[in-house]
Amino acid sequence: MNVYHNGPIYNFYNIDQVFDYLVSIGMSPIIELSFMPSDLASANKIIMHYKANISPPNNYNNWHDLVVALAKHLIDRYGIDRVSKWHFEVWVNN
């Protein structure tokens, strides 16, 4: 959802719009960290028509920082009680 651009500047606007709506109608999102942001990818390993990058991160510290920033953002916005009940899925490409 276009969160990472030449980090560590994160843009959670698109995530907020979707999650705010889901929460407003009583649903819980399932968070899937599946494709690598282009600016964080170690290669240009693209699949599918929307050009999803499946390469590992070029810097695991930056990947860690992004995941931590997302978790903190979600907790700050929706509260630990709600977020701790959401399901998270992380894809790993070896």
Image (tube, rainbow, N blue to C red):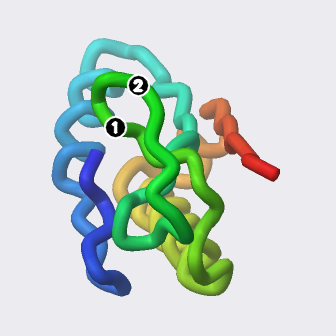
Mark 2–mark 1 distance (CA, rounded to whole Å):
6 Å
x, y percentage for residue 79? 48, 52
Place residue 61 in its image quadrant: bottom right
Local crowd size for mark 2, using a 10 Å CA cut-off: few (<14), some (14–19), many (≥20): few
The amino acid type, in three-letter code, at marker 2 is Met
**Height in image: 60 above or below 27?**
below
Q: Which residue is mark 2?
A: 48
Pointer 2 and pointer 1: residues touching (CB < 8 Å)? yes
x, y percentage for residue 11? 23, 65
Judged from the image, the secondary structure of the residue bearing numbered disc 1 is loop
Task: Locate residue 34 relative to residue 48 in the image: left or right.
Answer: right
Place residue 60 in its image quadrant: bottom right
Residue at 54% in and 27% down:
30
Residue at 32% in and 67% down:
4
Question: Disc number at residue 27?
Answer: none
**Height in image: 50 above or below 35?**
above
Question: Disc number at residue 51?
Answer: 1
**Height in image: 17 above or below 13?**
above
